[in-house]
Image (cartoon, rainbow, N blue to C red):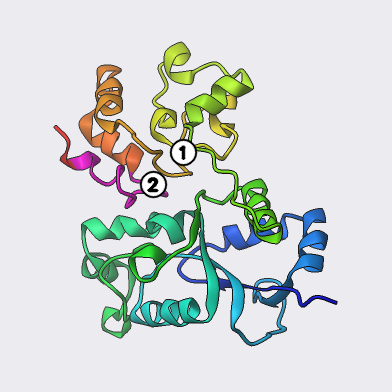
Amino acid sequence: MAKRPKIAVFKFASCDGCQLTILDLEDELLTIGQKFEIAYFPEATKAVVKGPYDIALVEGSITTPHDADLIKQVRKKSRFLIAIGACATAGGIQALRNWKGSDEFMKYVYAKPEYIETLDKSTPVSYHVEVDYELRGCPISKQRLYEVLSAYMYGRAPKVMNHSVCMECKLNGTVCVMVAHGIPCLGPVTHAGCGAICPAYGRGCYGCFGPRESLNTVSLSKKFQESGVSKEEVVKFFRLFNAWAPGFREVEAEP
């Protein structure tokens, strides 16, 4: 019997949502279990098989000196490293501290901030080590995850979607919430992957899957302001799950 590739799942600063998405694969987990050896996954099992690993799925941003050291160790013992979720690919919601610095927040949150050891910024995994593939989302799409693992199983490149959430709305027949109702929506500048869930329920896109390629935040920001949204509120629209992602984090500096 051929030796199954080892897969390991690692967590850094995050809410565990992307790991739970892996478990939410349900029936597909049977296939994954047949094709891969689940070597390390504390969220699901206490069993540990030592590396090296063929695939490392990494959830969470790098926020402490310990994280920065550990991710380098993970990289060394992993053939392929896949960053999963907004925290791992863009710093996550915790990257909001990057505009102020950790000291500013710690003095309000912790009674003894001198005991806290942290980096000044919350950063993506790619800031510290080479990443072979990134799966965006808050949380990731289980269908996209299964596609990436399937591509590895059969030795092909993953099928990548490069269009925006707006295109997903059109494919789904969803009426544009900006045009029809004047609701601010990040769909035009956000990468597809969620199935355009929020607009389907009459809400604007929150940018969960991060900035798309060739985005134009300047025009979208102006459109928001023309509809009565203040400049301060416009900035807040981009300061969510992917706030530190290039393309979103520059919005504050725009005229």
Q: Secondary structure at mark 2?
A: loop
Q: Tell me the mark number nearer the camera, choosing from 2 and 1.
A: 1
Left/right placement of residue 94 relative to residue 7 reads left
Whole-percent x, y for residue 135 in the image: 52, 53
Residue depicted at 40% across the width and 68% down the height: 130
In the image, farthest residue toward the right? 1
Question: Quick one: label 2 or label 1, which is nearer the N terminus?
Answer: 1
Q: Height in image: 197 above or below 35?
A: above
Q: Which residue is mark 2?
A: 240
Which residue is nearer to you in this view: 48 or 24?
48
Q: Amino acid at mark 2?
A: Leu
Residue 103 lies left or right of residue 109; in this view the side is: left
6, above or below 108, in the image: below
Does the segment drawn in magenta span residue 237? no
**Quick one: which residue is furthest to the top in this view?**
180
Indicate the position of residue 221 as horizontal and vertical percent values.
Answer: 27, 28
Residue occupying image coordinates x 14% and y 32%: 255
**Mark 1, residue position:** 191
Q: Which residues are magenta?
A: 239-252
Relative image position of residue 19 (x, y in whole percent)? 62, 63
